[in-house]
């Protein structure tokens, strides 16, 4: 069961201005701000290069196929974080600290989330590595040199998504609607749909959306039970470290990976492994709930 005092403390800042229209306008502001941030970045680059070079650079950044472009892509999520903070400030009169929750709890749970993910992903990684021959990715020496910057980029990227979906959206919906169908389902559905990418995922596109949506549900539930973004953020961060820095599916967002799977992967062969990932997410959820239930 939820600990009412913990959940209430987390959503209390959103109760001051809980009107649904404020959230809708706030989300629109996030989109506009983020799009404006990306456009401004593109205009800046336009001053430094030709149209053809700019289009090529933007295409490479969208694919993240080399270290520089993937780092730029991760850094671009700072615009999403800023947009979320600006929207919360303008529409609800609150800041980043109210979105994250108590810093002491958030920091502790961030490392708890990393620990839970590592325990689950280690055996999963062995299973995945047996699926197909891996091909070498980034040179290990260069990988190690770029690792601190890459980790910082992933903190920004995962933090921005958590602040929007498990922070701002979840809090404002919970302040407006008592039913979990509002604050639990809607942010998770939105989180899954923004990962819709048929070009990269092919026949597994909707399975990826479902898997991402499942992560959203688990992250939202653990956020509500822990009273901060820390646990969900740690899980998200550790997951992306594995997927982007250790072993990538190839064909996109693989510029910083030590190893890559052959691309394009066989869609049918991937499905059992994706099902395993979803089962491990459920296991992490159960262990996380157990840990929170025995917390004072």
Image (tube, rainbow, N blue to C red):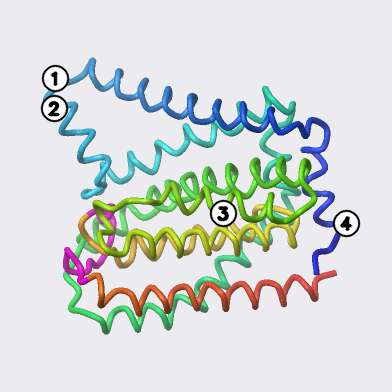
Q: Which residue is mark 4?
A: 5
Please tell me how many numbered marks the rendered image carries: 4
Direction right: furthest residue? 5
**CA gap, disc 2 to disc 3?**
37 Å
Categorize mark 1 by other alpha carbons within 10 Å: few (<14), some (14-19), many (20+): few
Q: Which residue is mark 1?
A: 50
Which label number is shown at residue 188?
3
Mark before the other along the chain sequence, 4 or 3: 4
Mark before the other along the chain sequence, 1 or 4: 4
Q: Which residue is mark 2?
A: 53
Q: Residue at x 61, y 26 (%)?
A: 25
Q: Is residue 80 left or right of residue 95?
A: left
Marks 3 and 4: in contact by CB < 8 Å?
no
| 13 is higher (above) or lower (below) than 28 | below
- Secondary structure under tag 3 reads helix
Q: Nearer the viewer, mark 2 or mark 3?
A: 3
Q: Between residue 252 and residue 23, name the one nearer to us.
A: 23
Categorize mark 2 by other alpha carbons within 10 Å: few (<14), some (14-19), many (20+): few
**CA gap, disc 4 to disc 2?**
55 Å
**CA gap, disc 2 to disc 1?**
5 Å
Q: Is residue 89 left or right of residue 118?
A: right
Mark before the other along the chain sequence, 4 or 2: 4
Q: Quadrant of the N terminus?
A: bottom right
| 1 is higher (above) or lower (below) than 157 | below
- Answer whether residue 256 is magenta in the image: yes
Q: Is residue 152 left or right of residue 112?
A: left
Residue 242, given in percent of the width and then of the height, sits at 39, 65
Marks 1 and 2: in contact by CB < 8 Å?
yes
Q: Nearer the viewer, mark 4 or mark 3?
A: 3
- Answer whether residue 3 is magenta in the image: no
What are the residue bounds of the magenta stretch?
252-266
């Amino acid at each position: 069961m939820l600990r009412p005092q913990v959940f209430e403390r987390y959503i209390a800042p959103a109760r001051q201005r809980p009107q649904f229209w404020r959230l809708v306008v706030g989300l629109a502001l996030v989109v506009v701000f983020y799009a404006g941030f990306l456009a401004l970045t593109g205009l800046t680059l336009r001053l430094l290069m030709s149209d053809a070079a700019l289009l090529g650079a933007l295409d490479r950044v969208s694919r993240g196929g080399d270290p520089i472009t993937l780092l730029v892509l991760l850094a671009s999520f700072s615009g999403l974080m800023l947009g979320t903070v600006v929207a919360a400030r303008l529409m609800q009169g609150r800041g980043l600290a109210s979105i994250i929750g108590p810093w002491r709890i958030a920091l502790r749970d961030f490392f708890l989330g990393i620990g839970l993910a590592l325990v689950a992903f280690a055996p999963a990684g062995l299973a995945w590595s047996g699926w197909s021959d891996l091909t070498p990715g980034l040179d290990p020496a260069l990988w190690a040199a770029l690792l601190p910057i890459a980790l910082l980029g992933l903190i920004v990227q995962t933090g921005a998504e958590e602040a929007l979906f498990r922070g701002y959206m979840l809090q404002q919906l919970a302040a407006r609607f008592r039913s979990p169908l509002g604050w639990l389902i809607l942010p998770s559905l939105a989180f899954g749909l923004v990962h819709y990418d048929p070009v990269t995922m092919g026949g597994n596109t909707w399975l990826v959306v479902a898997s991402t949506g499942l992560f959203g549900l688990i992250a939202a539930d653990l956020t509500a039970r822990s009273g901060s973004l820390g646990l969900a953020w740690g899980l998200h961060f550790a997951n992306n470290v594995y997927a982007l820095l250790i072993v990538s599916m190839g064909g996109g967002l693989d510029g910083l990976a030590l190893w890559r799977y052959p691309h394009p992967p066989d869609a049918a062969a991937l499905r059992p492994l994706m099902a395993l990932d979803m089962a491990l997410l459920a296991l992490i959820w159960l262990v996380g709930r157990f840990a929170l239930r025995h917390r004072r």
